[in-house]
Image (cartoon, grey):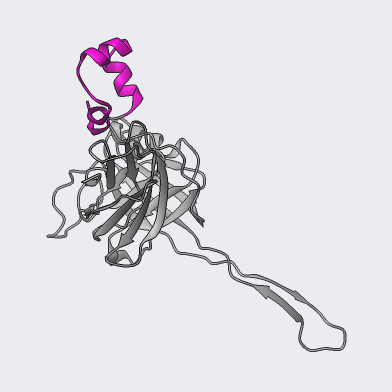
Amino acid sequence: MPITCTPDNNLAVNLITMDYTGEAGTQTSVLIERSVNGGPFEAFINYGLLCQQGYYYDTTMPLDTPVTYRGTSNDGFVSTCMSTVDSSGFVWLKDPGRPWANIRLDLCMVPTPPADPDCAPPEEPIALIQFGSENRAGDFALFPLLADEFPADVFSRRKAPTTSIQFASRTCDAIDAIYQLFTAGGPIFIQAPPIYCWPDRFVQPGDLQMEYISRDQRKPWRLWSVPLAVVDSPAIDNIQGVAGQTWCVVDDAFVTYAGLTASGLTWGDVVQGI
């Protein structure tokens, strides 16, 4: 099939592979539409092909839900694929343009897990503490009126929520991973299992605060707090790839393009990880 989709549960993304080399004609672009859990198809991205091939990471699809992708090439050839990306019970903080920086949060407190039989000894480097309370600011103004008991009330739709999140890290590597996610400075995408009643949404992080948990500061445990403002979906341009599949990895592995060519790897191999 010209369109295939491969879930990556380690980073909560879907790799969409487009390969029309086996089809008649010359395909130069493909319109990809997405259907969630059997619902209507909605336009997702119009992707330009190179030599009738292309690779794209869907980083914002719902988790734990079947998603169908329908690709229609510029000459009308239609194909579909379906996959489900598992949350595995984690809360995900994601940068859709830099999926290699995505981090997942387990639910066990640090430095030791709570007395909960469902909470195994901690294995993930980062743990969710809590989401903060939400505030939806009103958008209105009151104007006193002469000789009137009531003011004039001018109002409009309430603002999107502001909230916060707290999480804890267990390792020095986790501190670096948190830096990598937040350093770009733009919106991040937060997804949580349905039990949280947290809808998938973009948030703009405020100041990122880190505190030491232990008085012995040689211990790597850290407590993180950051305010969040829910924002509209940003434009997502080029996607950098996931861990092990970026230009930095290619540059580290091969000194020259000739070395990459001599390896026999295809660009598809590079996308899958070298």
Query: What is the span of residues highlighted in magenta in the rendered image?
Result: 246-274
Residue 148, given in percent of the width and then of the height, sits at 82, 88
Q: Residue at x 23, y 46 (%)?
A: 4
Horizontal side of 93 relative to 17 (left or right) equals right
Residue 147 rendering spot, x and y as whole percentages: 87, 88
Q: Is residue 248 above or below residue 209?
A: above
Rendering quarter of residue 251: top left
Q: Position of residue 144 (x, y in %)?
A: 81, 79
Majority SS type along the magenta span: helix
Q: Is residue 274 left or right of residue 32?
A: left
Q: Is residue 200 visible?
A: no
Check the image and report above or below for 164 versus 207: below
Q: From the image, which quarter does the C terminus lie in?
A: top left
The quarter of the displayed image where residue 174 is located: top left
Magenta stretch: includes residue 65: no
- Residue at 26% x, 15% y is 261
